[in-house]
Image: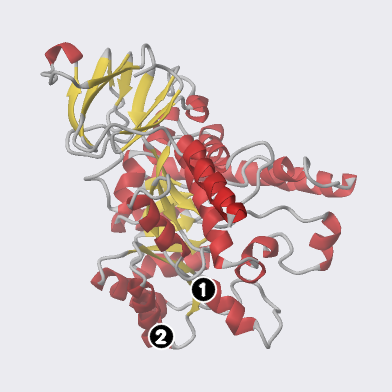
Amino acid sequence: MRRCTKLLALLIAAVICTAPAAAQPSGSVTLVKAGRLLDPRTGNVLTPAAVLVEGDKVKQVGLASQMSVPAGANLIDLGAATLLPGLIDGHTHLFLDIIVPPEAEMRRHSNALFAPGLLLAIVESPTKRALLGAQSAREDLLSGITTVRNLGHSGIDGDTEVRDAINAGRIPGPRLLASGRKLIMRGSYLQSLNPALTDAVLNQEFLLLEGGADEARQAVRRNAFQNVDVIKVTADENLTVNELKAVVEEAHREHLRVAVHAADTTSIQTAIDSGADSIEHGNDATDEQLRQMRAKGIFLDLTPTFYDGFILNIAEPSIVLSPAYRAARASSAARGKQEYDQLIQRVRKSGVKFATGSDMCWFYPGKTRGEASVATFVKLHQAGMPALDVIRAVTVNAAEMLGWSDRIGAIEPGKFADLVAVSGDPVADVSELERVRFVMKGGQVVRNEISQH
């Protein structure tokens, strides 16, 4: 009994020690002052700036001298720092933590690069995966990501349960839009599984689209039963327009948006013709498809995860790579970089609505999940996107893509007080986003390395 009591005490202490800094009570008033405040929508900068926060919402934005601040309000003075809205990751996988396998395993097994993560459904318990997801969520929040859209690979109810725990204040984390199980065609993931176990394995992570439009509608209803926030579909050449259109119609009937994984031109066209709300990745989109997306108001959710040698960056610290493998990867990365640079320029020219997501599901040695995710956003600038557009992609644009423009994405009265601060100017140097020093979510201070209250 003494041993159990001691263990419980240690667990409670660990939770207290790792939780973000406690905030002011709900309904309290806080004045946040900073040297500068960036409005991503217009690009305008307010200097000096003040944000009056009441409870979890922004009450007023302007000059402190022009505000009527109640007596006893909390004051947070961030000095010369730059304030901007909390960052939004439009595409992530909090419950995956893929470690690049040895080179021999990648050569000898199909799906070897992704299988270690995808098979978490059977090699780890749902409880352990939920704890992993909670840790990833906390690390995202500490890096300034105050909202995430989790798009699959979370088991049957993992992301909905973590979302609810965050909302109830039981664990720290960003606002979380949960998708539940991803809708796929058989063969989209983990091919050549043991036939006796295939359905049991797949059903832990996915909802199969095999019975035409009726089955597609039923899959949406099963996720809706789990109280998801969004429907995620993987499109491939076997998915028909009628099937995906049924998904979209049923999801919209349930007031849910549909995000479609589509990388090749055939899948992208299927997503466009079906009326998807966002197309994830979209790497092979043609100029005509970008034009159609713009005309229909479909968002392109860019995911520059693999840009500029990502696999080598996460593999080299952990495993031995042969010279031949390293050279092949470097050559592939160079080609991919050039192609992505061209995609970004075509996207900018097309006028299509775009946001960005990290698609982070990898173990990145030396970085937390949040640090790795934010580093992915910055890659858009390396690919030729202006810094202000990168910031828009993870704030106002992402908020619109999620259907939450009335809640997040800008520091404006009535919206959640989700604020981050950096020391420098993120428009002059977008890598400042990787050095967030202050985080507030819903009026609660999560991280503050700039000032004392």
Badge 2 amino acid: Glu
CA gap, disc 2 and disc 1: 13 Å
| 49 in relation to 271, above or below | above
The disc, 2 or 1, on the residue closer to the chain's N-terminal end is: 1
Give the residue at x 38% y 17%.
452
**Which quadrant of the rendered structure holds the C terminus?**
top left
Badge 1 amino acid: Phe
Q: Position of residue 66 (x, y in %)?
A: 12, 14
Q: Position of residue 45 (x, y in %)?
A: 29, 19
Label 2 crowding class (10 Å Cα cut-off): few <14, some 14-19, many 20+?
Answer: some
- Can residue 94 be seen in this snapshot? no
| 374 in relation to 98, above or below | above
**Which quadrant of the rendered structure holds the N terminus?**
bottom right
Relative to the observer, which residue lies in front, 122 or 148? 122
Q: Position of residue 237 (x, y in %)?
A: 54, 74
- Can residue 309 be seen in this snapshot? yes
Under circle 2, the secondary element is helix
Identify the coloring.
secondary structure
Q: Position of residue 127 (x, y in %)?
A: 54, 63
Q: Which residue is mark 2?
A: 215
What label sits on residue 206 in the rendered view? 1
Give the residue at x 53% y 78%.
203
